[in-house]
Amino acid sequence: MHAFTRLAAAAAFVALGPIAPAFAHAHLKTSFPAADSVQTTPPTEIDITFTEDVNIKFTGATLTGADNKAVTLGDGMLMGGNAMFMAPITGTLAPGKYTVDWHALSTDGHKTNGSFSFTVQ
Amino acid sequence: MSPDAALAVCRFAHTLPLMLIWGASAYLSALVTGARAAEAWRPLQPWAVAAAIVAAAATAATLPVETAFIGNGWVDAFNPSVMGDVLTTTTVGQAWGGEAAGIVLLLTALAWPGRIAFVAIAAAIALASAALTGHATMEDGALGLAHRLNDALHLLAAGAWLGGLVPLMLSLGAGQTDGTVDVLRRFSTAGHWIVGLVVATGIANTWLILGQPPADWSSPYQLLLSLKLALVAAMVALALTNRYALMPRVAATRGMLTAIRRGALIELLLGAVVIALVSVFGILDPM
């Protein structure tokens, strides 16, 4: 067994070594507006790029203002492959701090969620 | 109970019975010849049927539980539109179709008494279908496919190990006969390869998912995976003790057979705990 195991393990590591590890969960990679950024012009959309392709049926975001009031977002859609989520902001954001709460389902069925904030000047 | 916890319970109640049916029937059809295999299977058949029914119930429950898990909690469990989206747009939904088909095949095979090899093949399909159908999308490419095949191989090898212990313990329980040492030797020869395969595919799987050993114990996934590895190491130690310390003394020393059976039973119980751990951490975030 030892010789076999060592051989198989060595083969596995040699074969798989150079590739990037695959994460089954979709994490936030970049966003617009960026987390903790200050926007001088009010953004008209929320973009979230994930580390994995996501399923649009079970991926979404909500936007809340500093007074805990929800801001209406248009229907979300995927852009540029299936890893970037975009939701248009209907109306103009007044100056203040906003929080985006997002949830995502990666294409292989794992759920993630998170939030980030930005400020409109 | 949260949908997450219910999903872990379903995963356990699906995987363990299928592993035992697959391993026991594969052991008998591959390593025991003709009439003796049929004779050894007879007392196992009702247990296999019961285990298959448990796995079938777990599979049936998985769809609403998965729908609640992916949707907005229990309110969505039987929401037809959410369930439809889960079935048609997610890979776990597609995998569920494969699992359900595998279970139907297994129940059919079990209704056909005396066809142990058919039971083994059907159980293997039921066990591995989730790994193969769930993620074998073309966009994953060759690497994705290799990952799924590795997953399936890992499940089958682990099942062969655990399930094979059941008929082995039964045959040892019948007391020592001329064939006892022969039975043990065949089991351990195959066992070396199977345990090697479990370890190799397990390492490959960890490498594909984490890209490193599970060293970050602040991540529940990596902590539970480490615990699993410790238990598997204990199982391997038990198997090696049985093979190299106890087995050579079976013919000469009384009570050795009982000791081997006890070791095999502890291996089996540790294996069940390992499946329980995987059922839990398999749905957690690896990072």
Image: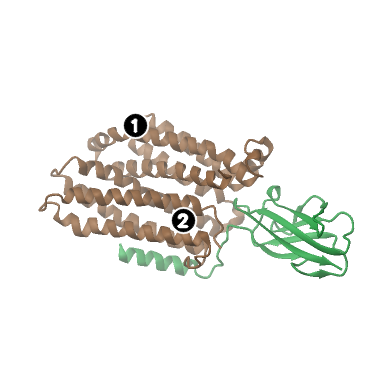
Q: Is residue B107 left or right of A51 when viewed as pictured?
A: left
Q: Is residue A66 left or right of A2 when viewed as pictured?
A: right
> Looking at the picture, which amino acid does disc 2 mark?
Asn
Residue occupied by mark 1: B46
Name which residue lies at 31% across and 58% down: B236
Name which residue lies at 37% across and 58% down: B231
Residue occupied by mark 2: B150
Tag count in the figure?
2
Name which residue lies at 30% across and 54% down: B191
- Look at the image and tell me whether residue B263 can be seen: yes
> In the rendered structure, which disc, 2 or 1, sits on the residue that comes first in sequence?
1
Q: Is residue B27 left or right of B130 when viewed as pictured?
A: left
The chain coloured brown in the image: B
- Visual hue assigned to chain A: green
Task: Find residue A7 and report its horizontal and vertical position in percent.
Answer: 37, 67
Task: Find residue A33 and report its horizontal and vertical position in percent.
Answer: 78, 65
Task: Find residue A49 and report its horizontal and vertical position in percent.
Answer: 71, 62
> Does dot 1 land on a helix, a strand or a loop?
helix
Q: Chain of mark 1?
A: B
Give the crowd class for mark 1: few <14, some 14-19, many >=20 residues within 10 Å: few
